[in-house]
Amino acid sequence: MSLAKPSLEMLRALTDENVLRALMEEGRLTRAEIAARTGISKPTVSDSVRRLSEAGLLADTGERTTGRGRVGTYYSLAADTGAALVASISPDGVVAETVDAFGTATARAEVGLGRAPGPHATAQALTEAVARVRPRVPGRLRTAVISAADPVDRATGRLVHLPDAPFLVGDLDPAEVLAGPVDGAVLVDNDINWAARAERATGCALGVDDFVYVHLGEGLGCAVVTDAEVRRGHHGLAGEIAHLYTAGPRGRAMPFIEVFAELGLRRAASTAIDVDALLGAALGDSATARRTRGALARAVGGVLAAAVALADPRLIVLGGLWGAEPGIAEAIREHFAELPRSVPVAAAQVAEPALAGARARAVEALRTAIITTPRPEASD
Amino acid sequence: MSLAKPSLEMLRALTDENVLRALMEEGRLTRAEIAARTGISKPTVSDSVRRLSEAGLLADTGERTTGRGRVGTYYSLAADTGAALVASISPDGVVAETVDAFGTATARAEVGLGRAPGPHATAQALTEAVARVRPRVPGRLRTAVISAADPVDRATGRLVHLPDAPFLVGDLDPAEVLAGPVDGAVLVDNDINWAARAERATGCALGVDDFVYVHLGEGLGCAVVTDAEVRRGHHGLAGEIAHLYTAGPRGRAMPFIEVFAELGLRRAASTAIDVDALLGAALGDSATARRTRGALARAVGGVLAAAVALADPRLIVLGGLWGAEPGIAEAIREHFAELPRSVPVAAAQVAEPALAGARARAVEALRTAIITTPRPEASD
DNA sequence: ACCATCTAGTAAGGAGTCCTGACCAAAGGA
DNA sequence: TCCTTTGGTCAGGACTCCTTACTAGATGGT
């Protein structure tokens, strides 16, 4: 039995939610406009606005309608309903932003990191970035959404290290670092998953319910979107494709990540791919470059075939430093088109994709937090 | 804006739904029992029962409470609320069942098929099976849920033929065949997907939200369950693993289905696996049998690794004629345990899994149909 | 045999929510 | 100045749900 019990209180809450959402989407509205937008009658809207104003969630903006007819009063969310924190964490540095319930970014700070910074320095950079945006926004930070360049454990939100995959950021628990400045829930996910959500919201996978986003950079990963959601799997490690068996050089079956070892394209003493070396070896018109491109295309093709077989996407999106490189992407596309059950391949197009995806979710989370704010019982 | 508009009608509908669901789960209840179960007050329940009785959805069963206190009246769903059809279609034959809203199977018929029957004979068998159960149930057949032993197109519900995969049932549109006897929606899905749902509901994957069900029989396939749902993908072809690249004999990368050609285990002039030959070649203690088992385990292991990489399941379930065969399953399990990121492997345990899964969904669909039955406006 | 006890269901009244339709207030245009 | 237009309020009514008190009818103890 997980069926909501009907009650008048529930109805009222639904009315208030309608009113709040209308204002979050539009910014400011008169009561008559809210009534027209939501389909709720004018007296009911007036009641709801009074309730929400008394609870401190709404406020008269002071603005008035102009034009024919009686002057109307514009209402908007109260100024102190709080903000949400968005941050992206990678070995290059930390970017932190705050957004309000209208989806507007209100502050931003970037903190760079030197070479091979380690988790301690990264945590400090995160703290620093948050400290820089914090004073520039009014109200509380009611929730945080974090993107990290490593796999994220779904249950704990901690970054995890998988065997034979590079640990780019390192052992870090963003929720712990943010426990001070943020007084609500902290949601952490992998940057590739956020990038996929961003491509679905505004990029080349606009509105596509089933697609696979393949990230080819220093690390290898992908995001699987089915039925309009990124599917994270039990531990949150869905899409960690380093160990997927594919075709290596000379037709041998081997884990995807091993292909780069065979081709001599991994960084020394690391499992990370040497992107500069890869681009140097694979671009151009020489016979060896063509051979390298072919080897990469076959290896990636095996991965794409696996994704198609298991997820049946409508589209495949290529992202990452070398995955989105036109010369290589074209080779992949050509090879993949030859395989049975090929699907369209597109290139990622959203700028700062991980941050964009996390930002959209942060707005949602903040709105939900505002709507579910416990309100005092009406009594006077 | 996809937010429900609040209204009193919606509240009443919710109350009625609570009452109906309580009765569907319990069979018969007095109004006082319904009130206790749902948390709704007794007068409100009485009102709802009166409404629903007048609409013909509920009826006094004639039974009365015994024991201390005033006699109570038992109510139950009306006898003519209809039934749902469940059918499983495979080259072996058709099994048809009807279920009522309580989840009880009320009639069953099986129609066998000869060797290589073809779609026409299969359609006839389906018609015949339905004709046999139809007279044994009162009321309409308000919905149908069908399991088919071939891939199913998600948009149309038709069976589809994939290159290099056996087309076991053949070109068939179950919805068309059933258009006469069934007057509601017809839902068609692959038998492997239904089997996975059954294992999640009552079998070895009980309550597991993320797992992969791998079917190894004449055909090859799998079902991917993430976030508690089977994910079908854009066309409904998620889990069609015949073309997935894996390790073949002598370490060569090749599509999964090709491994069986290399091992000489496919049926003549077909892409179907010769299960008898496979079991003959792989079982026993001879050196060649051990070699064959090893080759199969490596090939399946590559597929499992791909599924783990892309879906991150908590569990893998092996099903199908040779996948659930203990000797082979053990070889697969042993090999898979050696790979990085191994996860537990279990054997399927539900009997008639496809039918069981479809049956459960049929009950749900029927219940929803009854609850959303348009009811006459109260007016006298 | 009688009465206390227990339970299903009803009745009455009240609180709360939403809507319709009439009405009021104030500004712009004719 | 008067009419039109528009935001907002008021009054009344319909409806839903709940609490409290009560009735009906059976059991079980004394």
Image: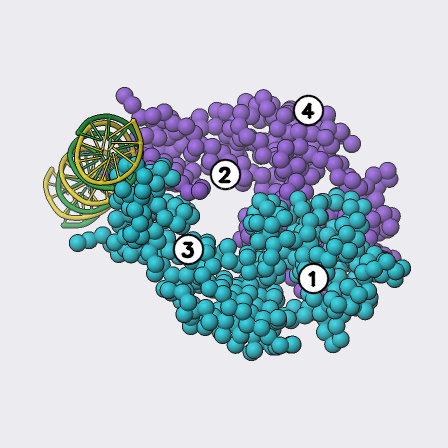
Chain colours: A cyan, B purple, C yellow, D green
Q: What's the residue at 31%, 42% (across, down)? A: A66
Residues at discs 4 and 1 both on one chain: no
In front: B82, or B224? B224
Task: Indicate the amino acid at tag 2.
Answer: Glu
The alpha-carbon separation of the residues under discs 2 and 4 comes to: 27 Å
> Which numbered disc covers residue B124?
4
| Kind of element beneath mark 2 | helix
Tell me the quadrant of the picture where the C terminus of chain A can be found: bottom left
Location of residue A142 in the rendering, given as x and y in whole percent from the top left corner = 40, 62
> Which numbered disc covers residue A101?
3
The image quadrant of residue A165 is bottom right
Q: Which residue is mark 2?
A: B364
| Kind of element beneath mark 4 | helix
Decide if residue A255 is on the left or right side of residue D10.
right
Callout 2: 10 Å neighbours few (<14), some, many (20+)?
some
Location of residue B377 in the rendering, given as x and y in whole percent from the top left corner = 34, 25
